[in-house]
Amino acid sequence: MSPIVRAALRQGLWTASRGWVGALALAGSLGVAPVWAQSEPATSQAPVYDLLVGTYTRGTSRGIYVYRFDSSDGRLTPVSSIQTVNPSYLVVSRDRRYVYAVNELPGDTGPASERGGISAFAFDPSAGQLTFIDRVSSEGNDPCYLAFSPDGRYLLTANYSVAADPGGSFAVFPLQAGGAVGAAVLVVHHEGGGPVKGRQDNAHVHSTVFAPDGRYLFAQDLGADKLYAYRYTDDGSRGLIGPMPEGYVQMPAGSGPRHLVFDASGHYAYLTSELAGTVTAFQYTNGKLRPLQRLRLAAPGFRGKIGAGAIHLSPDGKFLYATNRGDANEIVIFSVDPHDGLLKLVARQSTLGRTPREFAIDPTGRWLIVGNQDSDSAFVFRRDSETGLLANPTRLSIGAPVDFQFTPSS
């Protein structure tokens, strides 16, 4: 079926028919355990960060948790938390004054008619405190991703599904003075599906990622096996976000594209495909992605369930990391060839728990933290910048952790 993308503006409807579309006491009060990394003594020169953790709240978690992270020794000290429903993906504004979270609803147990949300919070980095500002409808079900527009004027969310109109969508929201989120000014729906029953019966937008040049947007559709390409015009001369002539990059049937990340040079991009359990390397030029390489995450002969998840590059760009869930529960490490962007397998390392959905590398590149959603735990690993390998894990007890964001602590 050819996809139809309907862009619903606040004032009118636009339709296209082509293929586009610190302390122990505080730890107890938060219901978590402090982590003390097994590493060298702290040094005064190492930066300290705030680490924000998003969770699923259907169990013991209450929302977003804030920790103070010492990059000299990997130590985490709990600071605060704030209640909000299923904040499974977070972003921090460039000035560090605001934090935005999806409210992934209805989730597994809510009514299909329930819309998800986006919640805005003021953030005080010096105190590590979040204060609720407002919440708006995500204009879809199960929002699972957030991204700022290159000019910082808009916030985009990926809605995994839309109950009233089957098929995933993404929506664009203006950011207002004081950190509030305005009502959506644009909603783009995808239609279609793939061959995997139960997972690809409809389109499912899983992420919206801007290219480093700030001119193009890619929407990864797990249900339709496509990477939809759009042009972004911040002056609105082409309708803010409009389709590229090529429409999309077609991925293998049943692969389920999920998350995309660009390298710092803007020449290469890397994609996890959840259902196939693969990583694909692309060459990027002027809004076009050309596949270069596709590698499986699971070890040869592996027969269990798989599920590619998060993907991130190390700060120096030398290594690429991706999670593989299912029965594997690993972080897979690749080296990146600086000349052609191609990947080479380095290692597969256990996350020491079940369902590693997301992870983050701290800005110094010395530490990696990964959350095990179904084990109520996260682990901080020391990262070797020369080999890319992870070692000396220390455990953080926290209910259903699923996203991590580092930001400098004032």
Image (cartoon, rainbow, N blue to C red):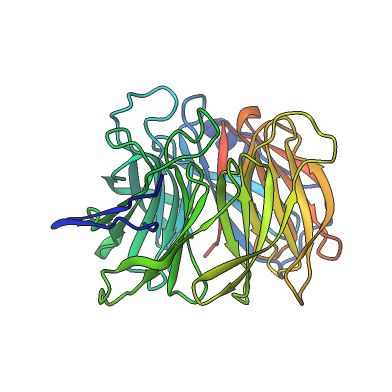
- 44 in relation to 204, above or below: below
The residue closer to the viewer here, 303 or 65, is 303
Residue 189, given in percent of the width and then of the height, sits at 33, 49
Left/right of residue 401 with respect to residue 8 in the rendered view: right
Residue 395, given in percent of the width and then of the height, sits at 72, 38
- If the image is split into quadrants, where does the N terminus sit? top left
The residue closer to the viewer here, 147 or 405, is 147
The furthest residue to the front? 1
> Looking at the rendering, which quadrant does residue 10 occupy?
bottom left
- Which residue is located at x 74 percent, y 74 percent? 340
Residue 198, given in percent of the width and then of the height, sits at 50, 28
Left/right of residue 101 with respect to residue 263 in the rendered view: left
The furthest residue to the left? 11
> Looking at the rendering, which quadrant does residue 267 occupy?
bottom right
Query: Is residue 375 visible from the viewing direction of this image?
Result: yes
Left/right of residue 407 with respect to residue 98 in the rendered view: right
Query: Is residue 359 visible from the viewing direction of this image?
Result: no
Residue 368, given in percent of the width and then of the height, sits at 71, 52
- Which residue is located at x 81 percent, y 34 percent? 302
Left/right of residue 13 with respect to residue 320 in the rendered view: left
